Structures are given as structure tokens and as C-alpha cells.
Amino acid sequence: MAARKTTSGRSGSGASRPKAKAGSARAKQAAQKKARAKRSLAPSRTKRGLEATEVALSSDDPAVAALAEEIRAAGGAVLCAYREPLAGAPLVLASLPLAAIEPTPFQRDLSPTHVKRLAQKIEESGSFLDPLIVVRGDDGRLWTPNGRHRLAAAKVLGQKQITALVSPDEALSFKILALNTEKAHNLKDRSLEVIRMARALAKARPRAKESDFANEFESAELLTLGIVYERQGRFAGAAYGPFLKKVDRFSSKTLAASLREREGWASRLEEINAEVGRIVEGLQARGFKSPYLRTYVVARINPVRFHRARRGDDAPAMPIASALTRMAAAAKKFDVATVKQGDLALVAAVAADED
């Protein structure tokens, strides 16, 4: 019996080593991530922007005079003008009637729940302190690229006027992802906003290249995902994000031409997702109940899952068309009998680390 205990003890110790190593690796990764975040928050030694005396600007200054006049014509009042302290762009702080402002048409869909909660919190504080960003469009209208929910909340509260930072720079209309701070974007929101912006820009600037708007669109895969989300509101885009990040890049083609090409990629992605759904159903029939089933399957059929890009190299792991072809083929060959519970446990652990 003693010998058996000794053998069992050794076996138990050996089994615990992989877990200990995995825990140590995760702890090391967490420490490295924390260190990188700390370094990125270090104050810059190089000082930028304007001096205090350079910020002040008269509302009669030629840089904002026409804008100030339009604000008054819309029933608003100019409160002051100044130069934005980082880059020096002219801005007007104004009080505007709610009816004079419209949200840009490519923003996220309005969330009634968020509007109700926001109105309640504003009512509780007794103050509306967060100005909208408003831009003057080339059609003469005043647009807000990041204030749809605050504007709706103000209407719920019955406000007559709303405070806004008004800019003559129409390009701000297409910088929603950078400007929006009122409600965190999820992947679906970001993707839909980006594809809506792309469609609007394709009409407004037919000769412009997709790559010209890399900053506005933030990441190329959001365009492809946006097309899929337009067709399937409940698409599990997060499962395909890691794959697309490695193969989807901004195109040097015109926006219209690129969007036509992406329509095809989106259709192929939908076909792959349908096949993945069939595989997930097969795994569930075998008794697998993990919430990471789809993520696991997509990772298994991802043809570039082991690709590691070199630092500074933004080249795709492989052309997206080829990657989609290989992914579709892998999905059709997927054998649910090869899946083990331990495989899913590893996916869950990785997902927890990423969160």
C-alpha cells in the first residue's frame, strides 16, 4: 500500500506541473501587459500645443465669424470662441436649440435603454455638463457625430437648448470612433458605424481610396464585419476577429470598388459561419455545453492561427481570399469526434486571460 501511495503521489505531482507552468505563464503575461500599460502612460518629455495666451479667440475672428453667424441664424447663442489647445483648430462654444442639431446618419442605432438611463442620471445630477461635438456640414446643417444619445436624453428631459462645441471642420463627422465617449462601443457598434461611414464617403468622394480613411475606419476588418452585421444582426463577429485581423487590410482601390469586393468576402464569411453552426450543433449533440464552442471551432479552422507577425510588419498573413477558401475547406472537413473536453478548457482559459 505504501508503494502505491508513493507512486500515486508522484503521478499527482507530475500532473500538477503543467497546471503550475500554465499558471506561471499567465502570471508572467499579465505582468508584462501591466508593465507595457505603465510605460504607455508615461508623460511625454516633449511639450506640444498652444500657450495659454494663444488659446483665446474672439468670436469676430475670421476663423469663426461665419460659423458664429450660422449659430445665431439657427437660433443659438455664441458663448465664446477659442483655439483647441493641442492643434490650434478654432472652436465655438455655443448654446443651440435641440431642433437645430441632427445626429450623423452613420452612427450606432439609438438604444432606448441607454437614453432612459442617461436622462435619469442627468436629472439626478441636476446639470447637463457634457457638451456635444457639433460640426457644420457642407449642406449647411449642424451635425453631431458623437451625441445621438445625449441629444435624445435632452429631448426626453424637455430641454430647450443644449451646449455644444461647434467646429467648422466637416472631417470630424467621420471620426466617430475617436470622439465617442458617452457609451462604450462593442464590436457590432463599431463595425456598423464604420461600414455606414464608408458607404457615405463612397458617395461623397467617389475617387477616394479606402486606404485614405484608415484613421477614420480604425481597422480594416471592421468594414467586412460591418457588411455581415448589416445582414445578420446576431452574427458572432468576435469569434472571427482574430482571424480577420491577420488577413484583412485596407485597399488601395476606390471605396466603391473595395466595398464591392468586401461584399463577396462577407458572403463567404456567412457561408463559413453557417458551416460552423452545423459543427457546433454536432458538438452539442455529443454533450458539449461550453459557451466557447463557436470560438473553439473557428480557432481550429483558422488557417493563420499560428502566424506571428514581425514587429512593424503589417503585411497580411496570407491574402484574405485564399484564407477564406482554406477556412471554408477546413470547416467542411471538421470531425466533431476529435474534440475533447480538455481542448475547450484551454480555449476558456485563454479567453479569460484576454478579458
Image: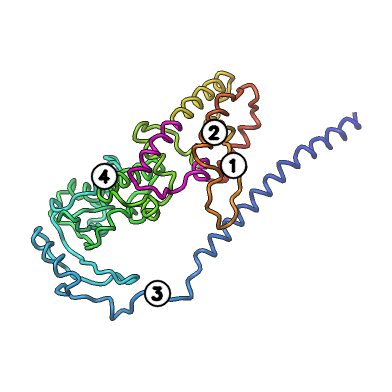
Circles 2 and 3: CB distance less than 8 Å?
A: no
In the image, what residue occupies the spot 50% across and 40% down?
320
- Per the rendering, the mark at residue 43 is none
Who comes first in sequence, dot 3 or dot 4?
3
Q: Marks 1/3: CA distance?
A: 40 Å
Give the amino acid type for the residue marked by disc 4 in the picture. Answer: Val
Q: Which element type, helix, strand or loop, lies under badge 3?
A: loop
Whether residue 85 appears in magenta in the rendering, the answer is no
Can you identify the residue that label 4 sits on? 115
> Which amino acid type corresponds to the residue marked 2 in the rendered image?
Val
Identify which residue, 325 or 106, lies in the foreground: 325
Which is nearer the eye, 19 or 52?
52
Q: At 57% from the left edge and 32% from the top edge, which residue is drawn? A: 301
Magenta stretch bounds: 242-269
User: Is 95 placed left or right of 108 in the picture?
Assistant: left
Image vertical order of residue 180 relative to residue 72, above or below: above
Q: Which of marks 1 and 4 is nearer the N terminus?
A: 4
Q: Which type of secondary structure does the marked residue at label 2 adopt?
A: helix
SS at mark 1? helix
Q: Within 10 angstroms of label 3, few (less than 14), some, or many (20 or more) residues?
A: few
Where 59 sits versus 116, above or below?
Answer: below
Residue at mark 2: 298
Mark 2 packing: few (<14 Cα in 10 Å), some, or many (20+)?
A: many
Q: Mark 3 points at which residue?
A: 48
CB atoms of marks 1 and 3 within 8 Å: no
Quick one: label 4 or label 2, which is nearer the N terminus? Answer: 4
Residue 184 x/y as whole percent: 38, 48
In this figure, which residue is indicated by the disc labeled 1? 350
